[in-house]
Amino acid sequence: MEQAQEALPVPLVPRSSYAELDSSMDNKQVIIISGIRRCGKSTLMQFMRRES
């Protein structure tokens, strides 16, 4: 199964980055999410897309 087809785990572990990103969503500047492999970057983006 491809990663894009996988469902988000429920419940998600709360992260401080969610609140930081949520407050930045109204900003028109580009936000760069970086990190090592398999640290949750795609899951974070899926969560933000689902919540918006």
Image (cartoon, rainbow, N blue to C red):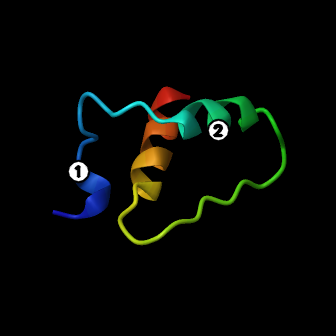
Marks 2/1: CA–CA distance: 22 Å
Mark 1 residue type: Glu
Figure quadrant of residue 17: top right
Report the residue marked by disc 1: 6
Instruction: Point out the frontmost of discs 2 and 1.
Output: 2
At a point 74% along the width and 36% down the height, the residue shown is 24
Residue extending furthest toward the front: 16
Looking at the rendering, in which quadrant would you find the N terminus? bottom left
Looking at the rendering, in which quadrant would you find the C terminus? top right
Report the residue marked by disc 2: 21
> Taking 13 as reference, is 40 above or below it?
below
Of callouts 2 and 1, the N-terminal one: 1
Say which element carries label 1. loop
Other residues around mark 2 within 10 Å, as few (<14) / some (14–19) / many (≥20): some
Q: Position of residue 16 (x, y in %)?
A: 55, 35
Q: Position of residue 26 (x, y in %)?
A: 78, 32
At a point 50% along the width and 39% down the height, the residue shown is 49
Mark 2 residue type: Leu
Figure quadrant of residue 19: top right
Number of numbered discs on residues: 2
Q: Is residue 41 left or right of residue 34?
A: left
> Taking 43 as reference, is 21 above or below it?
above
At a point 35% along the width and 65% down the height, the residue shown is 38
Figure quadrant of residue 42: bottom left
Q: Is residue 40 left or right of residue 27?
A: left
Q: Is residue 34 left or right of residue 23?
A: left
Residue extending furthest toward the left: 1
Q: Position of residue 33 (x, y in %)?
A: 60, 59
